[in-house]
Image (cartoon, grey):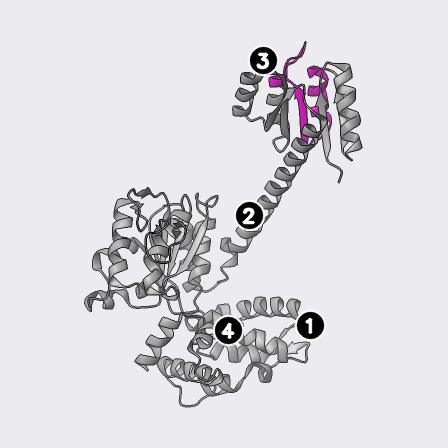
Amino acid sequence: MTPRVLVVDNDAEMLALLRRHLESEGLAVTAAASGREALRALGEAPFDVILTDLIMDDVGGLEVLAAAQRQQTHARVFLMTAFGSIETAIEAMRQGAYDYLTKPFKLAEVTLGVRRALDDQRLRQENERLRAEVERQYGLDRLIGGSRAMQAVIDQIRAVADSGASVLLLGESGTGKELVASALHWNSARRAGPFVPVNCAAVPEGLLESELFGHEKGAFTGAARRRVGLFAAAQDGTLFLDEVGDLPVAIQVKLLRAIQDKAVRPVGASEEIALNLRLVAATNRDLPALVQEGKFREDLYYRLAVIPIRLPALRERADDIPVLAERFLRRAAARLGKALDGFAQDATAWMQEHRWPGNVRELENVVERAAVLAAGPVVTLADLRTEFAVTAGASALRPTLDELERQYVRRVLDEVRGDKVAAAKILGVSVRTLQRKVKDF
């Protein structure tokens, strides 16, 4: 659609000149010879950019600006003014004008200003569209769960989203802790701020302090430039610390201080940065047990767990499995360009009986793999039952959850010939977590 520009000036020669020039630039121009005409035009049609003279006989440019702000909040308003009225124009910018042009000006300046305003408007509209899309993606309706266990979680999120208190998400790997953290952010008053996730176990221990708190140029060998830490990057928003149970004790001390003081000091800096953010942490580990073992600070645990929310394992919410599987299937089918209409009855029954040691993440992977294999239009039990699935899900021995997890990890490691980095990526955990599990096994 051709951008629409309203030009307002009681100087007939200037008005005609601007109209001809802007039309030659491919813009749709409406000319108003007075402020009163401009007010009438604002009530009749939408405009993307408004160029108005500041001093006019009847209605001045500030009144046109005020009317535009009431009626067309998206429009960008320029004040055109003589040199002696620049202070007034600057005051108009404080009141919401986009910019001002000082007479006499070159037509190239007008073109540049209008194009810049249109680009800014498009960028803002795109940002609003993307933000709306993100809010839709991470709204509470994205948290599928008709089961009692999941409804309890959704009720907790709804109750605490706006509180600002620290939240600790507890649950096994693959239960959707980052999705819940996102829902907490996008359903809170901080939604206009950033959501900054960090996997604490994925960052090398030697870089954690710099990653979280930032550093100054030259603070240590290799610090070639200043780095803004993730705490500062999450200012006015939400910082999500995933796998917080894997933090080294030395970093736990500094994290506790940051939470208590509501400030961080980048490595090598002489001054602190005041913080205004919401902290959400998550772990699949037993933090009280780690506290007893001296591996996690008790005072930090209580700071993080102001509001603990436990996410149920998928086996505890079997009623939600068909709905989750259908969503994953629709998404996979769209990506593959295949016509898949759902699951055979025995396939659905098998999914609800399976233990799912990898939880929702494992279900999603199995469904996506089945979508690739399925001849269609219905996904069958044979499509779902991979070698692992048959071993884990149909065994008459009913292996324990630990045994299932051990089998799964061993199988993935075998498939990637022992490459722990590749295996961790497939399993959806950090290399450090995988190394710990292998050691435990």
Q: Residue at coordinates 58% horizontally, 77% vertically from top-left? A: 369
Q: Amino acid at mark 2?
A: Arg
Magenta stretch bounds: 34-63
Is 168 on the left or on the right of 42, as rendered? left
Give the number of the mark in front: 2 or 4: 2
Q: Earlier in the sequence, mark 3 or mark 2?
A: 3
- Disc 4 + disc 1, Cβ < 8 Å: no
Q: Amino acid at mark 3?
A: Gly
- Residue 363 bears which disc, if any? 4
- Residue 338 bears which disc, if any? 1
Residue corresponding to mark 2: 131
The CA span between labels 3 and 1 is 68 Å
Q: Earlier in the sequence, mark 2 or mark 1?
A: 2
Tag 3 secondary structure = helix
Confirm whether the magenta stretch covers residue 26.
Answer: no
Give the number of the mark in front: 2 or 1: 2
Confirm whether the magenta stretch covers residue 39.
Answer: yes
Q: Position of residue 12 (x, y in %)?
A: 77, 15
Mark 3 Cα within 10 Å, few/some/many (few <14, many 20+)? few
The CA span between labels 2 and 1 is 30 Å
Q: Amino acid at mark 4?
A: Leu
